[in-house]
Image (cartoon, grey):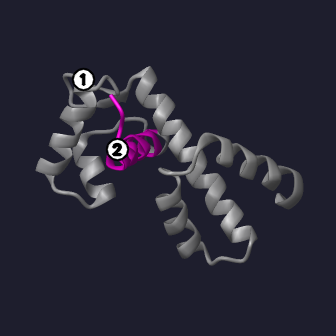
Amino acid sequence: MQLKESGEMYLETIYVLNQKKGFVRSIDVCEEMGYSKPSVSRAVGILRDGGYLIVSRDGGLHLTEAGLEVAERTYERHTVLSEIFMALGVDETTAVNDACKIEHVISSTTFAALKNYYNKNMKK
């Protein structure tokens, strides 16, 4: 199943919330993303059916290996692109917002080249 941008965003949000809290429920995703319970419930069902997410009996959301891979890749792109943009002088809000859009469409090849260039030439 090929994920759309929204699926990647949900997985990234679950990943980040899990890093912060250790236990994530649908309501936590609702609050973090500002979406309604029915919207999150539908997305969770799609991600579960796609093999990206497991919902435990206590309502906990747990990323599968496939879900974790997507979430970590998306989060890395988000953070690295944000850092690059800020290093270029873009204000933090704009940098984070732009990175959030670009992280879903940039190719692996281009991202790797940008990350390599940044790490060699710009990172302080």
102 to 51, vertically: above or below:
below
55 to 26, vertically: above or below:
above
The CA distance from mark 2 to mark 1 is 24 Å
Q: Which residues are magenta?
A: 1-18
Residue at 88 percent of width and 51 percent of height: 120
Residue at 22 percent of width and 58 percent of height: 35
Front-most of 85 and 30?
A: 85
Q: Is residue 6 left or right of residue 119?
A: left
Total label count?
A: 2
Residue hosting label 1: 56
Residue at 22 percent of width and 25 percent of height: 49
Residue hosting label 2: 4
Indicate the quadrant where residue 53 lies. top left
Q: Is residue 100 left or right of residue 86?
A: left
Q: Position of residue 82 (x, y in %)?
A: 62, 62
**Residue 16 part of the magenta-drawn span:** yes
Main secondary structure type of the part rendered in magenta = helix
| Number of other residues with Cα within 10 Å of mark 1, as a class: few under 14, some 14 to 19, many 20 or more | few
Q: Position of residue 89 (x, y in %)?
A: 72, 77
| Quarter of the image where the N terminus is located | top left
Q: Secondary structure at mark 2?
A: loop
Q: Position of residue 78 (x, y in %)?
A: 56, 53
Looking at this view, name the residue that lies furthest to the left.
38
Which numbered marker is on residue 110?
none
Front-most of 58 and 91?
A: 91
**Residue 3 part of the magenta-drawn span:** yes
The three-letter code of the residue at mark 2 reads Lys
The three-letter code of the residue at mark 1 reads Ser
Indicate the quadrant where residue 60 lies. top left
| Number of other residues with Cα within 10 Å of mark 2, as a class: few under 14, some 14 to 19, many 20 or more | few
| Quarter of the image where the C terminus is located | bottom right
Q: Is residue 114 left or right of residue 56?
A: right
